[in-house]
Amino acid sequence: MKEFIEVIKNRRSVRKYSDKKIPEDVIIDIVDCARLAPTARNEQPWEFIIIRDRRNLEKLTAIIGKNAPFLKNASCCIAVFCRETKYYLEDGCAATQNILLSAKSYGLGSCWIAGDKKEYAEKVRKFLNVPLGYKLISLVSLGYPEDTYSPPKRALEDVIHWEKF
Ligand SMILES: Cc1cc2nc3c(=O)[nH]c(=O)nc-3n(C[C@H](O)[C@H](O)[C@H](O)COP(=O)(O)O)c2cc1C
């Protein structure tokens, strides 16, 4: 369990990846972790699309534009979609976080790329043949890390409040 705390504390967004392929069973296990996330009313509204084909990664990157130019060089991308339930966004974000943490646990780097609220969300949905009524939550780029940039974090004593703000 202490190892898991280290995984959480050491995860950082990684936007540069090596060419090394991610074994398929690792990708499948990461999605398995995602689908076990907490979900309001146990709706489990999520669907996960794995994109590995380089041409598809390039097309996705072109759709997304300046938000994530590094996506085309990732080993793989997991697109998280949710059926539009009341708590679709919370559910999809919980699943996305499970992807980031399980990826870190496997020694992979990842980056959460915005989905919901983005003007490209509809284009991504169509490109990936996702039916109407599903919302893009996130795209997660994955690969073995080459470089990690670690932006500063707010200090624990600045964010912790006991009893009241
Ligand atoms: C909802 C959400 C959307 C994000 N979208 C992007 C994005 O489109 N492109 C990107 O490079 N990083 C994106 N990020 C990653 C953040 O930039 C990153 O988490 C933040 O700078 C903190 O760094 P860390 O992940 O290394 O702790 C996103 C993160 C979240 C939670």
Image: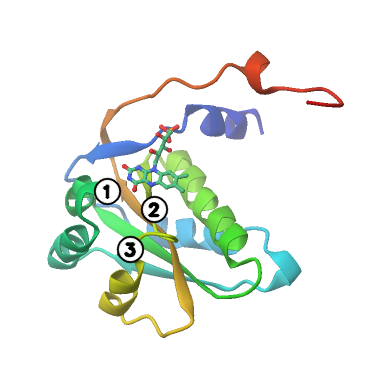
Give me the residue at 31% from left, 26% from top.
149
Percent from the top left, x then y, of residue 56?
A: 18, 67
Q: Which residue bears the numbered disc 1? A: 67
**Mark 1 residue element:** helix
**Cβ of disc 1 within 8 Å of ligand 1?**
yes
Q: Which of marks 3 and 2 is nearer the N terminus?
A: 2
How many residues crowd around disc 3 within 10 Å: few (fewer than 14), some, or many (20 or more)? Answer: few
* Cα–Cα span, label 3 and label 2: 10 Å
- The numbered disc on residue 4 is none
Nearest the viewer among 5 and 86 is: 86
Query: Against 151, is 36 above or below?
Result: below
Q: Which of marks 1 and 2 is nearer the N terminus?
A: 1
Tell me whether the residue at label 1 lies in contact with that at label 2, contact meaning CB atoms closer than 8 angstroms: yes
**Cβ of disc 2 within 8 Å of ligand 1?**
yes
Q: Which of marks 1 and 3 is nearer the N terminus?
A: 1
How many residues crowd around disc 2 within 10 Å: few (fewer than 14), some, or many (20 or more)? Answer: some
Q: Which residue bears the numbered disc 2? A: 114
Q: Quadrant of the N terminus?
A: top right
Q: In which quarter of the image is the C terminus?
A: top right
Left or right placement of residue 110 versus residue 98 in this view: left
* Cα–Cα span, label 1 and label 2: 8 Å
Give me the residue at 34% from left, 73% from top.
122
- The numbered disc on residue 119 is 3
Query: Against 83, is 56 above or below?
Result: above
Percent from the top left, x then y, of residue 3?
A: 59, 30
The amino acid on which the numbered mark 3 sits, given as a three-letter code, is Glu
